[in-house]
Amino acid sequence: MSSVLVLNGPNLGRLGTREPDVYGAGTLDDLRTVLQSDAPETTIDLRQTDEESQLLHWLYEAADSGAPVILNAGAWTHYSYALRDAVSLVTKAGGTVIEVHLSNPHAREEFRHTSVISAVASGVIAGFGFDSYRLALAHIRRNGA
Ligand code: DQA
């Protein structure tokens, strides 16, 4: 596998300064460095957007290229049916989309207990900070997805 898409949704560009007690002190650049050193043979294509349509188009790109996706959709996780449909079109076509969260949404406010994407994702890893992404990447590498 040559490339893994690591897609991040709204407010995740603020990692490092945004609620560090919840999300940790590391930035997205730190995350890219950690993932790249875990998988030197792979291109870690880490992106972040605050625009929902942009995230949809990146998922279409994954559907077309077959690149595996690690997805932290931020708050869109909880209510975006458009995002759910885009994840579904990737996984139903045989692609891999692993839903990840830094925090454990189930241990937080009630509105975070619902994920509209989990049912169509390949798997879900939450609550382990950067390790949520690292575990997802380890799975992808192990399975050559
Ligand atoms: C998050 C959890 C979401 O509830 C929240 O809206 C985020 C980050 C996480 O990584 O823990 O933005 O996806």
Image (tube, rainbow, N blue to C red):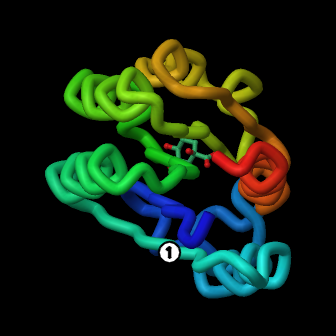
1 displayed left or right of 5 = right
Question: Residue 88's spot in the image, x, y percent?
Answer: 35, 24
Q: Quadrant of residue 38?
A: bottom right
99 displayed left or right of 14 = right
Frontmost residue, 111 versus 78: 78
Residue 19 drawn above or below residue 107: below
Frontmost residue, 83 versus 42: 42
Question: Residue 74's spot in the image, x, y percent?
Answer: 47, 46
- Residue in the picture at 82% in, 83% down: 37
Frontmost residue, 135 versus 81: 135
Report crowding for label 1: few under 14, some 14 to 19, many 20 or more residues within 10 A (C-alpha).
some
- For ligand 1, give the image quadrant: top right
Question: Residue 134's spot in the image, x, y percent?
Answer: 80, 59
**Residue wearing tag 1:** 45
136 displayed left or right of 17 = right
| Amino acid type at mark 1 | Asp
- Residue in the picture at 77% in, 83% down: 40
Q: Quadrant of the N terminus?
A: bottom right
Residue 16 drawn above or below residue 92: below
Q: Quadrant of residue 3?
A: bottom right
Does residue 79 appear anywhere in the picture? Answer: no
Asked if the residue at label 1 sits under 8 Å from ligand 1, the reply is: no
Residue 145 drawn above or below residue 39: above
Total marks in image: 1
- Residue in the picture at 70% in, 22% down: 106
Outermost left residue:
53
Query: Element under label 1?
Result: strand
- Residue in the picture at 74% in, 36% down: 125
Does residue 134 appear anywhere in the picture? Answer: yes
Question: Residue 41's spot in the image, x, y percent?
Answer: 74, 80
